[in-house]
Amino acid sequence: MENYYLLLDSGNGQKLEQFGSFTLIRPCAQAVWNPVKPEAWKNADAIFTREGNNKWLNKNRLPSIWEIRVANILFKIETTDFGHLGIFPEQQLFWQWIQEKISSQPNPEKIQVLNLFAYSGGSTLAAAKAGAQVCHLDASKGMVAWARENAQKNGLNNAPIRWIVDDATKFLQRELKRENFYDAIILDPPTFGRGAKGEVFKIEEDIIPLLNLCKSLLKEKPLFILFSCHTPGFSNLVMHHLLSQVTKDLRGSIDYGEMIIPSNTSFSLPSGTFARWQSG
């Protein structure tokens, strides 16, 4: 089975993607242009629509679970009621960068990484594959279980990964009291979310305190902070300003920009923004 991911086309508020042997159509608000390859859409295996109630059309054509490999990481793919499939492909360049950044260190096995809002574990697995110790945190028990499945698929079930179901802010506060510090922190906060016990997270109100807590948990000579976001209005310049204020007394550099899903057959698709500080 062909087990890779491809963005085949986008347009008219949708995207056409290949997940292994299956092609799927899903909503994509930013794709306001016309499709480049309209003929390619005719043979899609299934469609997710938000018209009426959220639903998959032709879902019976898909297996209940399958696998794909992205950035040398195996992921379990499964259709959900929200249209998600267990992977955000726009993160794939970061997964490659994380592996390269950590593996290039003199002692990668000593690098300690914190991954917040960690979803199905792409960044966690990238760091673990490179040899690092990782703390993986998400407020969803189900998503942490999904990430652990992905770890097992990648032969990392015995890797030094701490699996945490918790509210990010409360966990960071406890880590600070415990004096558990990290070489690298990765975070992809939602626009709005609820913690493991119903705690409310609103990015406009909570992002600065969260970033300050992250800064407090960095070791004396940290390696990197990787901050990504899908919130409308959080432009790449906004991301830069937020991260530059937090890291102003750290020795290093910041790069920032749009996250994209590249395509060899159509337009690349903008899918959020990022800012990244690294030592040097």
Image (cartoon, rainbow, N blue to C red):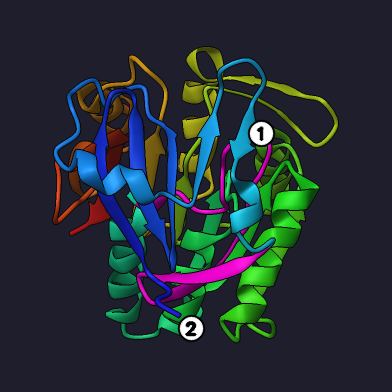
Residue found at the very far right of the displayed protein: 197
Say what amino acid the circle numbered 2 marks. Glu
Q: Nearer the viewer, residue 170 or 62?
A: 62
Q: Residues within 10 Å of mark 1 (few under 14, many from 20)?
A: many
Q: Quadrant of residue 25?
A: top left
Identify the secondary structure beneath mark 2. helix
Residue 109's tag is: 2
Position of residue 152 in the picture relative to residue 106 (left or right): right
Seen at 72% across and 41% down, the residue is: 139
Residue 89 % position (x, y):
38, 52
Identify the secondary structure beneath mark 1. helix
Q: Is residue 102 magenta?
A: no
Q: Nearer the viewer, residue 168 or 72?
A: 72
Q: Quadrant of the C terminus?
A: bottom left
Position of residue 23 in the picture relative to residue 261 (left or right): right
Upstream in sequence: badge 1 or badge 2: 2
Question: Which residue matches tag 1?
Answer: 169
* Magenta range: 65-89
Q: Quadrant of residue 213?
A: top right
Q: Quadrant of residue 100?
A: bottom left
Q: Is residue 248 visible?
A: no
Residue 165 % position (x, y):
77, 49
Say what amino acid the circle numbered 1 marks. Thr
- Measure the alpha-carbon separation of dots 1 and 2: 27 Å
Seen at 35% across and 70% down, the residue is: 71
Position of residue 199 in the picture relative to residue 185 (left or right): right
